Amino acid sequence: MKHLEEKTLSSKQIFKGRYLKVEQDKVQGPDGNIYTREYILHPGAAMMIPLLPNGNVVMVHQYRHAVKQVFLEFPAGKRDHQEETIKTAKRELLEETGYEASTWKFLTTIHPVIGYSNEHIDLYLAQDLKKIGQQLDTGEFLEVVEIAPQDLLARVQRGEVTDVKTQIGAFWLDKILRGEWN
Amino acid sequence: MKHLEEKTLSSKQIFKGRYLKVEQDKVQGPDGNIYTREYILHPGAAMMIPLLPNGNVVMVHQYRHAVKQVFLEFPAGKRDHQEETIKTAKRELLEETGYEASTWKFLTTIHPVIGYSNEHIDLYLAQDLKKIGQQLDTGEFLEVVEIAPQDLLARVQRGEVTDVKTQIGAFWLDKILRGEWN
């Protein structure tokens, strides 16, 4: 794939907001010409599928102002200081849902915004859950819900689960529960 | 879900780069306190699964500078002037792959970046394809490939298809080809 790659000539941060940082690079394209590329600098994130002994998954309802809707999501959060994402996952599961899990399995890595962000999200399956108690950050409002995997998949089919990380989690869980993927 | 919603108090564009626009809003949270929210303003996009009569799908390899990798993707592109996404889909399919499709089916809408962008992507299934000829935009470099759906799904399982829209397209196609979803 070398023939499709672009060579970075220079790189600078052109915006720093309260939360978002924008990088602007000059690159040399495969045709030899110079192009400008802009993207958000993101620390990376972790998401987990918390699977209860009763077969349900633990999820959250959260309002997302960028889209101005309440979303049904798997718990997730951003990395602190480039920590390993398993550490992020454990912290966020406890903070957002109040559960701790003693069995963790890495599933896959996804890139949600390849056009304009370097964000990656590592997905985990969390099992053997124990309830401890929710510890939300300031300014974070969410509601914990329990859902059966088949109900979640039906909601995906009906277009009711539009958050990509959550929809991908629902499909991976479906493959795992069918015994097709392990 | 009203009790989770935030009320927008003010909204302003705080950054406009060559490509990216950042909006910063003041909102009142469910607790009555004032919070700052920042997000990218995006026009929306369309993606399609182009399914050939031989059972393969038409995909593209494209270098994405934000992540500095070549990705295997379903063809996709941004809306022009708030056009209907079916129009975007038809234009992008022709531009990127050189195919026209006479049968189109809307599948679903996804939100790739609910934390910091208002982007939505409408997904379509495109069938009855006819080859016309690729018409790439300046500065766009991509390679068209044909892949069997089962091979695509195996690549998803192995973690080789990390672009979220493409991975979601692969799972929807799997459900459709199994006859589980129509």
Image (cartoon, coloured by chain):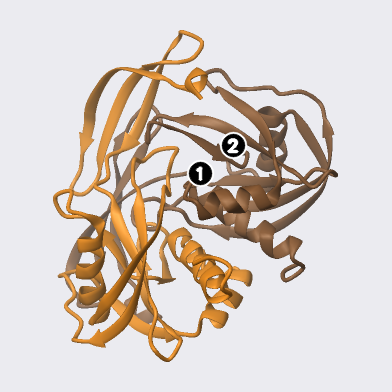
Chain colours: A brown, B orange
Q: Identify the chain of the residue marked 2, using the numbered disc in the image.
A: A
Quarter location, residue A31: bottom left
Q: Is residue A182 above or below residue A98?
A: below
Cα separation, mark 1 vs mark 2, equals 8 Å
Question: Few, some or many C-alpha atoms within 10 Å of disc 1 (few <14, some 14-19, many ≥20)?
Answer: some
Q: Residue at x 29, y 55 (%)?
A: B45
Q: Identify the chain of the residue marked 1, using the numbered disc in the image.
A: A
- Badge 1 element: loop
| Residue B18 percent across, percent down from the top left | 18, 48
Q: Which residue is mark 2?
A: A80
Question: Which quadrant is home to the C terminus of chain A?
Answer: bottom right
Judge whether residue A127 can be spotted in this image. Answer: yes
| Residue A144 percent across, percent down from the top left | 66, 30
Q: Is residue A95 above or below residue B21?
A: above
Residue B118, numbered label: none
Residue B63 horizontal side relative to residue B94, left or right:
right
In the rendered picture of this protein, how many numbered marks are placed on residues?
2
Name the kind of residue labelled 2 in the image: Asp
Residue A43, numbered label: 1
Could you tell me if the residues under marks 1 and 2 are in contact, i.e. CB atoms within 8 Å?
yes
- Badge 2 element: loop
